[in-house]
Amino acid sequence: MTKRRPDFENSGQDDSSRTELDVYDKALRSPGVDGFLESENLGLGYYDDAERWQQIESYRFGLFGDRVFSEPLIDRAIDETKRQLALKGTNFYDSEAQAPASLTGWDELTDDEKKSLKREERIDKRRYIEQQGEQVWKNMTDRQRKEAIEIATQMDRKWTPPQWRMLMARHETSRSRGARLLDNVFGREKVNRVIENSNKGGGSGGLFSRGDS
């Protein structure tokens, strides 16, 4: 029985286009051996030999910086955020109780409440900050934690070594050299080389030559 609808999903033209796109994607994609290299796709830069080695040196120094400073800076930001939450208080969604919740900050407590905590529960300012900060952090969602870190420390993303920031800047500016990136995208470099090679051949002339006069 003849199908009522053509199979648009498996047409030959679609398969050819998909295959071609897959080839382009594979050629342009960095190998997934390093998250930083994969995200920046440094293979698409346009460097001379000296610049290429400069990029490698920046990457090498950035590796050391990332290993030494990245995790400690994040840990320090988290500790400072917990402290600020316990001091100033906050409203948040308790992921464990699945309900809105609030924390009264130490600075919001009255003198009588502080004395009562110290007398009845042996909780001073330091213990209050440690206990309440840890508890509210535990019950927050990841999104709330990221927002809290940004507000408390102005740290809105993972720290990036300055060597890697310079590497990324050189990479971006290199792609505009001689409009090479645009040439590759729109095929203009190929046309220029055809004209140049034809002119070098002599005899009948180049692409726009009428021949011998």
Image: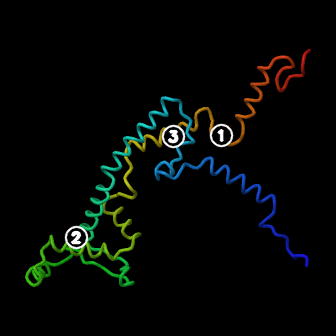
Q: Position of residue 112 (x, y in %)?
A: 11, 81
User: What residue is disc 3 on?
Assistant: 171
Mark toward the viewer: 2 or 3: 3
Q: Which mark is residue 182?
A: 1
Whole-number angstrom distance, CA of label 1 to CA of label 3: 15 Å
Mark 3 burial class by Cα count in 10 Å: few <14, some 14-19, many 20+ = many
Q: Which sits in the foreground, 138 or 23?
A: 23
The answer to whether mark 2 and mark 3 are in CB contact below 8 A is: no
In the rendered structure, the answer to whether residue 4 lies left or right of residue 14 reads: right
User: What residue is disc 2 on?
Assistant: 87
Q: Which sits in the foreground, 178 or 50?
A: 50
Mark 2 burial class by Cα count in 10 Å: few <14, some 14-19, many 20+ = many
Residue occupying image coordinates x 36% and y 84%: 97
The answer to whether mark 1 and mark 2 are in CB contact below 8 A is: no
Mark 1 burial class by Cα count in 10 Å: few <14, some 14-19, many 20+ = some
In which quadrant will I find the C terminus? Answer: top right
Precedes in sequence: disc 2 or disc 3: 2
Q: Position of residue 74 (x, y in %)?
A: 32, 58
Residue occupying image coordinates x 26% and y 62%: 80
Mark 2: which secondary structure?
helix
> The disc labelled 3 sits on which kind of residue?
His
Residue occupying image coordinates x 70% and y 34%: 189
Whole-number angstrom distance, CA of label 1 to CA of label 2: 54 Å
* Colouring: rainbow
Precedes in sequence: disc 1 or disc 3: 3
